[in-house]
Image (spheres, helix red, strand yellow):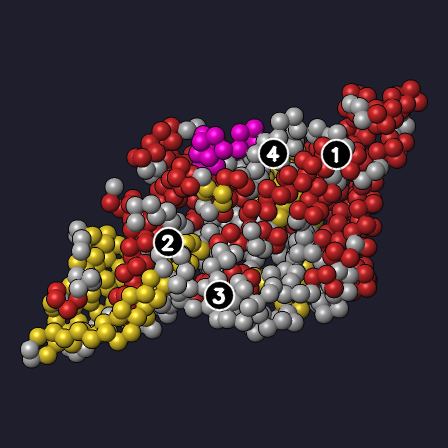
C-alpha cells in the first residue's frame, strides 16, 4: 500500500496560485463552481457564537484530512470546516479499499491516517491557503470561516500529552504559521505578509466511537470545556432512536432489508434517557463556565458487512448517504421535542443539493456533507447547494436564513401562535407574513423566539415528510453506476474525467499527451556494432491521459467504484510519487518518479518490480536498467545509440515513459509533480 503523505506547502501554494492565474481553477475545481456571495442575501449562521458565512461545511472525514481538501471544501462554499478526527493512536492501519459509494454509502475509515503532527500542519496549511484565496479576491463577501476541531475516542487518549499538544497548537498555531509563512515561494512573496490567523480553532466536535459509555462521554466533554476551555459539540449515534424505531424507518418505511444493525450497537451505545440526562448536565456545566455546548446528529450507523467490497476482515461497516438522512432527521425531531431550541444542533447525514435548503431551514448549524461529495462532480456539488438555497430564499422573499426558516416549511403562523404575543403584535406579524413584508421588523424583540418555535415545528414536519419520501428508499437507491464492460488499462480510457473531481484528495490528474503511435525498437549489440529492429508500437489514442499522484492517494477505492470501466484509476493508471523516498518505499507498486538532473530531468519507472530510468537532456536520452545503460537520440536510435548492454534491450518502456516525462515537464503543465519540479529548479 502507498503511504498517504502531505504535499509540501510550497508545492500546494505554487499549484493553487499558478492554476488560478493560468486556468481559472484551483485544485481542478473550475472558477465557475467557486461559491460566490449573493448581494442582498445574508447566508450566515452562528456556530457557537462565531459567524460562518454559509450554513454549509464539509463533515469531518475524507474531505478535511489534507490541506488541499480543506481549500477545495472552502471554494465549494464550506464555511464551517470540521477537521478530520484525530486520536492518540495515530498509526492506525485503515483497511483498503475503505469507501464504497456504489449505491448508498458505506465506509470502514474512521480516523486520521496521518500522524497528529501532520494533521495539525495540514489544518494550518489549509487555513493559510484559504487566506491566500481571500487575498486573491476569491469568495469576497463570504469570508467568515469557522474551523472546528474533532478528537476521539476516549478520555485517556484525549488527556494524553500528544492530543493536548494538538489542542493547544490549534488554539495557538503561531509557531506553525510562522514556519510555513517562510515556505511560501518567492514568486508569491507578497502573500508572506498576510495576517494569517493563529487562533485557528477553539471549538470542537467530540467524535465518540460506537459503544462509548455515556459516563465516558460526559467526562470527556467536562475535560474539554473545563480544562481546555473549548466550546464543544457531541456527535451522537442513530441508535439513540432505539431498535424498534431504527428498524421501522430503515426496513419498514425505506425498504433496506439487507441492512442489519447488530444488536450490540444498541446494547453498547447510550440510551435516549441516558443521553438526554447527559445533555442537561453538560448544558448546565458549559453555561456555568461561559462556554457553549451542543449536539451533532448524527454519526454514521454501524451495520453488518453484507457486501464483498471491503476486506473480509471487516465484520462491520458504517452506513451513510440517503438512508441516513431520515434517521438523522428523526433524531433532530426527537431532540427538538425534548429540548426545543435550547441547544445548537450540528447536522450530517445524507445531505445533498435536493435536501440542503430544507435541512438548513431547521436552524441546524452547520449542515455538513460528506458522502454526496464523493459522487461524480465532487466538490462542484457545493455550488448547487448554495445556488438552490438562494433560489428557495428568493422564492419566499427571505433575505437571511432566519427569515427563510419561518417560510420554508409553512409553519410560521403555527409558530407565532405558540409565542403568546399580544394580539396587536401578532396581527402585525401575520400581516407581514401575508404580504411578504419584513418579518424581523414586524416581530421586533420576539423575532428570535418566533424563529426558535418555527425550528421545532419545522423539524416535526420535515421528519415526517422525509421518512415518507421515496427518494430515500432502497428502490430508488438500488442501481449501481453504469459500467461499459471494458477493463481500465494504463493508457487510454473513456477519459470521462469523473475520477478527477470525485477524489477528495485531488489525487487524479490529466497528462496532456497528444494522440500518437510510436514505433518500439529492440536494440542489440553484436560483433559489428548495434542493430535496431522495430518490434511493435506504443499508442496513445486519446487527446489526454489520466494519472494518479501517489502521495495524495490513500487507495480508498472510490474512483474505482464510480469509474465506468472495470478496475480503478488508482490501481491501473500511471502512479506518480512525489519523491524518490516515497517511490522506493512502495516497492509493491509499479509507478514513476521524476527528478531534476544535470541539464535535464530523470524519470524512474517500476514495471513488475523492475526499475528503469529515462534521463532526458536536450535531444538525447539516457536509458538504463538492470544489465544495460544506453544513450541515443530517440528520433534516430539506429544512428545514435551508444553504451553497454548484456543482451538485447526492448525500448517499450522508454517509449511509454518519454511522452509522460515530456507532459510532466512541459512549461504549461500544472500538477503536483510539475509544480514540485519547478520549485526544485527555482
Q: Could one spot residue 461 in this view of the protein? A: yes
Vertical position of residue 222 compared to residue 288: above or below: below
Q: Which residue is mark 3?
A: 568
Task: Name the spot of residue 79 as percent of width and height, x first.
Answer: 58, 38
Q: Which residue is mark 2?
A: 512
Q: Which residue is mark 1?
A: 395
Specify the farthest residue to the left.
Answer: 528
Q: Residue at x 17, y 61 (%)?
A: 633
**Which disc number belongs to residue 52?**
4
Q: Quadrant of residue 308?
A: bottom right
Of labels 2 and 3, the one closer to you: 2
Circles 4, 1 touching at the beta carbon (< 8 Å): no
Q: Quadrant of residue 534?
A: bottom left
Disc nearer the start of the sequence (4/3)? 4
- Left/right placement of residue 420 relative to residue 99 reads right
Q: Residue at x 70, y 48 (%)?
A: 354
Amino acid at each position: 500500500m502507498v503511504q498517504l503523505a502531505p504535499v509540501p506547502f510550497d508545492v500546494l501554494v505554487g499549484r493553487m496560485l499558478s492554476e488560478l492565474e493560468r486556468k481559472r481553477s484551483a485544485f481542478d475545481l473550475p472558477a465557475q463552481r467557486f461559491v460566490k456571495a449573493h448581494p442582498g442575501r445574508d447566508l450566515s449562521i452562528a456556530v457557537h457564537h462565531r459567524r460562518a458565512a454559509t450554513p454549509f461545511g464539509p463533515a469531518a472525514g475524507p474531505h478535511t484530512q489534507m490541506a488541499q481538501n480543506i481549500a477545495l471544501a472552502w471554494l465549494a462554499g464550506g464555511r464551517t470546516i470540521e477537521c478530520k478526527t484525530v486520536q492518540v493512536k495515530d498509526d492506525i492501519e485503515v483497511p483498503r479499499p475503505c469507501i464504497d459509494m456504489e449505491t448508498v454509502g458505506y465506509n470502514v475509515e474512521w480516523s486520521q491516517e496521518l500522524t497528529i503532527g501532520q494533521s495539525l500542519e495540514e489544518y494550518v496549511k489549509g487555513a493559510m491557503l484559504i487566506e491566500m484565496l481571500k487575498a486573491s479576491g476569491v469568495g469576497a463577501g463570504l469570508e467568515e470561516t469557522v474551523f472546528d476541531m474533532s478528537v476521539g475516542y476516549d478520555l485517556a487518549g484525549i488527556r494524553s500529552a500528544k492530543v493536548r499538544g494538538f489542542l493547544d497548537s490549534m488554539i495557538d498555531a503561531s509557531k506553525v504559521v510562522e514556519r510555513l509563512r517562510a515556505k511560501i515561494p518567492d514568486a508569491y512573496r507578497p502573500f508572506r505578509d498576510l495576517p494569517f490567523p493563529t487562533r485557528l480553532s477553539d471549538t470542537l466536535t467530540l467524535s465518540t466511537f460506537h459503544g462509548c459509555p455515556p459516563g465516558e462521554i460526559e467526562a470527556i466533554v467536562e475535560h474539554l470545556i473545563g480544562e481546555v476551555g473549548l466550546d464543544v459539540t457531541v456527535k451522537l449515534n442513530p441508535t439513540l432512536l432505539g431498535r424498534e424505531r431504527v428498524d421501522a424507518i430503515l426496513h419498514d418505511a425505506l425498504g433496506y432489508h439487507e441492512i442489519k444493525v447488530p444488536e450490540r450497537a444498541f446494547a453498547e451505545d447510550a440510551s435516549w434517557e441516558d443521553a438526554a440526562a447527559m445533555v442537561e448536565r453538560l448544558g448546565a456545566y458549559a453555561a456555568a463556565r461561559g462556554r457553549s455546548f451542543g449536539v451533532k446528529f448524527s454519526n454514521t450507523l454501524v451495520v453488518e458487512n453484507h457486501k464483498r467490497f471491503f476486506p473480509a476482515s471487516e465484520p462491520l461497516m458504517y452506513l451513510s448517504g440517503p438512508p441516513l438522512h431520515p434517521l438523522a432527521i428523526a433524531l433532530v425531531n426527537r431532540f427538538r421535542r425534548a429540548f426545543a431550541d435550547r441547544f445548537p444542533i450540528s447536522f450530517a447525514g445524507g445531505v445533498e443539493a435536493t435536501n440542503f435548503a430544507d435541512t438548513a431551514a431547521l436552524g441546524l448549524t452547520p449542515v455538513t456533507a460528506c458522502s454526496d461529495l464523493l459522487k461524480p462532480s465532487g466538490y462542484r456539488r457545493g455550488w448547487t447547494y448554495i445556488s438552490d438555497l438562494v433560489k428557495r430564499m428568493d422564492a419566499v422573499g427571505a433575505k437571511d436564513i432566519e427569515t427563510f426558516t419561518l417560510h420554508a416549511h409553512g409553519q410560521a403562523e403555527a409558530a407565532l401562535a405558540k409565542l403568546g404575543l399580544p394580539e396587536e403584535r401578532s396581527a402585525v406579524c401575520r400581516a407581514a407574513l401575508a404580504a411578504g413584508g419584513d418579518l424581523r421588523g414586524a416581530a421586533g424583540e420576539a423575532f428570535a423566539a418566533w424563529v426558535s418555535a418555527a425550528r421545532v415545528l419545522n423539524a416535526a414536519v420535515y421528519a415526517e415528510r422525509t421518512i415518507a419520501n421515496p427518494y430515500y428508499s432502497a428502490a430508488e437507491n438500488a442501481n449501481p453506476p453504469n459500467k461499459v464492460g471494458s477493463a481500465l488499462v494504463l493508457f487510454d480510457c473513456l477519459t470521462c474525467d469523473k475520477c478527477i473531481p470525485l477524489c477528495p484528495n485531488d489525487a487524479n490528474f490529466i497528462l496532456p499527451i497528444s494522440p500518437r503511435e510510436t514505433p518500439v525498437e529492440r536494440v542489440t549489440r553484436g560483433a559489428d556494432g548495434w542493430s535496431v529492429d522495430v518490434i511493435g508500437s506504443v499508442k496513445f489514442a486519446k487527446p489526454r491521459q489520466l494519472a494518479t499522484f501517489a502521495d495524495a492517494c490513500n487507495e480508498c477505492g472510490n474512483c474505482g467504484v464510480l469509474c465506468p470501466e472495470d478496475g480503478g484509476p488508482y490501481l491501473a493508471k500511471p502512479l506518480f510519487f512525489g519523491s524518490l523516498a516515497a517511490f522506493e518505499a512502495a516497492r509493491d507498486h509499479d509507478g514513476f518518479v521524476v527528478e531534476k538532473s544535470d541539464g535535464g530531468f530523470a524519470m524512474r519507472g517500476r514495471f513488475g518490480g523492475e526499475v528503469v530510468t529515462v534521463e532526458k537532456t536536450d535531444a538525447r536520452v539516457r536509458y538504463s536498467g538492470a544489465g544495460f545503460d544506453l544513450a541515443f537520440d530517440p528520433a534516430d536510435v539506429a544512428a545514435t545509440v551508444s553504451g553497454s548492454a548484456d543482451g538485447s534491450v526492448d525500448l517499450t518502456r522508454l517509449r511509454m515513459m518519454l511522452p509522460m516525462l515530456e507532459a510532466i515537464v512541459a512549461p504549461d503543465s500544472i500538477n503536483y509533480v510539475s509544480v514540485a519540479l519547478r520549485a526544485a529548479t527555482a
